[in-house]
Amino acid sequence: MRNFNLKEGGNIREKLLVLSDLDYLFSYSILESPMPLTNYVATFQLKPITDGDRTYAEWTAIFDCDSQDEKHLIKLVGDGVFQTGFNALNQIFNK
């Protein structure tokens, strides 16, 4: 379980569902969130790129929400969560 506060306010509780060192992946679900979504499950996986010494990172999520919230939540998760995470990883590994 992971429990954290957002800097904008609000609290998120997540549960780790899968952790695989062999497949370089983890999956988690959101149990509580200020976002108007349910049944959120995300997976993060690292895959080797065979042309050079690089890694491909893939982060996906599925969730349910009201149709009027869908576009906003896709952008929020994609840009606000995933892209922010990728940017942080890029800063750490490309110094």
Image (tube, grey):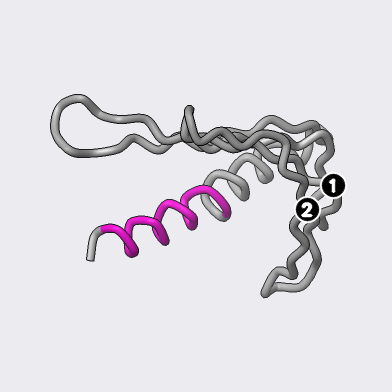
**Residue at the top extreme, as displayed:** 50
x, y percentage for residue 47?
37, 30
Residue 62, located in which quarter of the rendered image? top right
Q: Main secondary structure of the magenta part?
A: helix
x, y percentage for residue 57?
40, 38
Residue 13, located in which quarter of the rendered image? bottom right
x, y percentage for residue 83?
47, 50
x, y percentage for residue 88?
42, 61
- 2 and 1 marks in contact (CB < 8 Å): yes
The residue identified by callout 1 is 31
Kind of residue at disc 1:
Leu
Pointer 2 or 1: first along the chain: 2
Left or right of residue 55: residue 21: right
The residue identified by callout 2 is 1
29 shown above or below 11: above
Left or right of residue 91: residue 66: right
Classed neighbour count for the residue bearing mark 1: other residues with Cα under 10 Å, few (<14), some (14–19), many (≥20): some
Kind of residue at disc 2:
Met
The C terminus, quarter of image:
bottom left
Does the magenta-highlighted stretch encompass residue 42?
Answer: no
9 shown above or below 43: below
Range of magenta residues: 81-93
